[in-house]
Image (cartoon, helix red, strand yellow):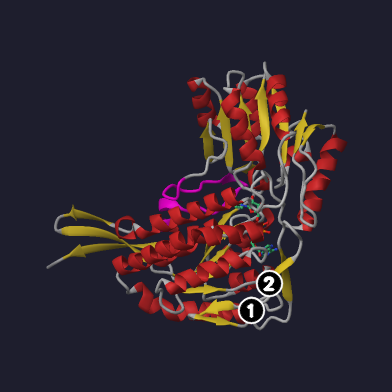
């Protein structure tokens, strides 16, 4: 495909032109040059994809689960074979460094491996003699047509959290990937088709909010799995449920890292730096704020400042780059505005990474703020860029109290050598994914991805057994034979 052409949707086993009249440019964030165009698909395109998924559902749900799992294994082999190519696509369209991109592809493959265990994980239960001669069986069946709506920051991992598991549970699927990273999604669509999934079981519709709103209103969609920013998540949850759909909506974050005076700084500082500045801070598990517990906050700030002042920002594909670009020019401006806002509010920039090397891309040199106060907007709002703030606290109890004031509750971490303090943190902190001396507490694919508070809307989380529950409906059969 030349850059001039718009990407095609994938419907009923074929690549098809969208009826869209508008196209969205896709720049390489490292250079600002256009690498693709996506159609702004509308209601007619969504309807076509949903009808295809609906039509395929009847036969697909009757395919034995072991056969469905074999197709997932075939997909896993394709992903393994193409992992490097896929990682390089992520570098190009998302701006992750190659190591970061490789890691994210690996995490996606883990989710596919979990999906392949469906013959075990889909099993129901049976209880004999609930009453004399009466038995009860619980079985799980697919929900129907599932739509997946995904963000820009994990172009491979998040679609792979959703589609393989939804499919292996017997559902058919429509993916609406982020319009900012459509190339990885197209790669995944080809891999799914080449793995032998029947026509119509997996469909791909490119586009933006226009396509999403058509999905939310479409009566042929039974469930919506969403990952993205907080305002969109709220909209997806309220609109989707108002249309009678099952919805899980993973939202934004503001994650606190508590550092106690006894923390092993030689090992903690690199983990905190990687949490805050890895993937240019565009990670829902990124540490956005350090709460440094006295005595010792000065020491923590000095060590963080030294590390931040050395972080190299530049073109994502350059092996020397530690911090790649952010996703778009408007996001770059937004992050820079947040930095200016922090200074205006009285927080102090104590370190800034060297000026970015790359030209034409969307770079933000990493920034460390000291003397952030919990009530400041830079401590409350998600910045989603390479910016770390330090709040000082007098005790562990105060640090936990500060972190719990956040309206978000995705992740939190503590760095300490004190087991009792770590236990207190785990017990009291109001967030769902916790790290003890781990900066990015990302659950493996066989555990749920458990955001709390404003970081999640719904009941059943993505990944792990929660996701199996989300992608299935239960039946309870009570049997007596005369
Ligand atoms: P986003 O909300 O802008 O977009 C996500 C998806 O929703 C895209 O497919 C987009 O096309 C669509 N969309 C955007 N605006 C819409 C609207 N008004 N109506 C309907 N659909 C709309 O999110 P993003 O910027 O792509 O992703 C970054 C965000 O995702 C961050 O806030 C991050 O914290 C969050 N995130 C959360 C998790 C988690 O597990 N909680 C994981 C990854 C990312």
Q: Which residue is mark 1?
A: 43
From the top left corner, tell me how far across and down residue 390 is, in percent.
72, 30
Query: What predominant SS class does the magenta segment belong to?
Result: loop
- Span highlighted in magenta in the image: 444-469
Magenta region includes residue 8: no
Residue at left offset 58%, top offset 77%: 9
Q: Quadrant of the N terminus?
A: bottom right
Label 1 close to label 2 by CB (< 8 Å): yes
Mark 2, secondary structure of its residue? helix
Mark 1, secondary structure of its residue? helix
The foreground one among 98 and 320 is 320
Q: Which residue is mark 2?
A: 210
The numbered mark at residue 64 is none
| Above or below, 318 relative to 217 | above
From the top left corner, tell me how far across and down residue 238 is, in percent.
62, 61
Q: In the displayed image of the protein, which residue is found farthest to the front?
A: 319
From the top left corner, tell me how far across and down residue 136 is, in percent.
24, 58
């Amino acid at each position: 495909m030349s850059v001039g052409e718009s990407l095609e949707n994938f419907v009923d086993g074929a690549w098809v032109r969208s009826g869209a009249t508008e196209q969205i440019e896709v720049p390489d964030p490292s250079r600002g040059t256009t690498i693709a165009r996506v159609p702004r698909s509308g209601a007619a395109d969504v309807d076509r994809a949903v009808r295809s998924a609906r039509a395929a559902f009847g036969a697909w749900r009757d395919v034995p689960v072991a056969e469905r799992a074999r197709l997932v294994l075939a997909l896993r082999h394709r992903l393994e074979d193409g992992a490097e190519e896929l990682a390089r696509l992520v570098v190009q369209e998302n701006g992750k460094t190659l190591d970061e991109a490789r890691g994210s592809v690996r995490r996606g493959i883990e989710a596919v491996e979990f999906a392949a265990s469906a013959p075990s994980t889909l099993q129901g239960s049976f209880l004999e003699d609930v009453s004399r001669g009466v038995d009860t069986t619980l079985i799980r069946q697919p929900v129907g047509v599932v739509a997946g709506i995904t963000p820009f920051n994990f172009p491979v991992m998040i679609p792979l959290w959703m589609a393989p598991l939804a499919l292996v549970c017997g559902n058919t699927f429509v993916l609406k990937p982020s319009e900012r990273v459509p190339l990885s999604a197209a790669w995944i669509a080809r891999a799914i088709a080449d793995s032998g999934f029947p026509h119509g079981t997996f469909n791909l519709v490119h586009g933006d909010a226009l396509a999403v709103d058509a999905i939310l209103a479409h009566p042929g969609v039974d469930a919506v799995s969403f990952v993205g920013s907080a305002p969109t998540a709220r909209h997806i949850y309220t609109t989707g449920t108002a249309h009678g759909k099952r919805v899980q909506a993973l939202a934004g974050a503001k994650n606190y890292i508590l550092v106690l005076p006894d923390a092993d700084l030689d090992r903690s500082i690199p983990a905190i730096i990687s949490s805050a500045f890895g993937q240019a801070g565009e990670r829902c598990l990124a540490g956005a704020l350090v709460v440094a517990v006295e005595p010792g906050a000065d020491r923590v700030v000095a060590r963080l400042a030294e590390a931040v002042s050395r972080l190299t920002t530049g073109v994502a594909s350059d092996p020397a780059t530690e911090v790649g670009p952010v996703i778009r020019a408007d996001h770059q401006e937004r992050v820079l505005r947040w930095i200016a806002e922090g200074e205006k509010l009285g927080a102090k920039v104590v370190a800034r990474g060297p000026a970015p090397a790359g030209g034409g891309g969307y770079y933000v040199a990493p920034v460390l703020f000291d003397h952030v106060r919990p009530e400041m907007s830079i401590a409350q709002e998600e910045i989603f860029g390479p910016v770390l703030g330090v709040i000082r606290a007098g005790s562990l109890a105060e640090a936990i109290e500060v972190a719990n004031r956040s309206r978000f509750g995705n992740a939190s971490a503590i760095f300490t050598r004190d087991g009792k303090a770590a236990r207190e943190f785990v017990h009291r902190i109001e967030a769902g994914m916790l790290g003890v001396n781990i900066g990015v507490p990302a659950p493996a694919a066989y555990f749920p991805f458990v955001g709390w508070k404003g970081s999640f809307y719904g009941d059943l989380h993505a990944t792990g057994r929660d996701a199996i529950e989300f992608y299935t409906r239960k039946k309870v059969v009570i049997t007596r034979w005369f």
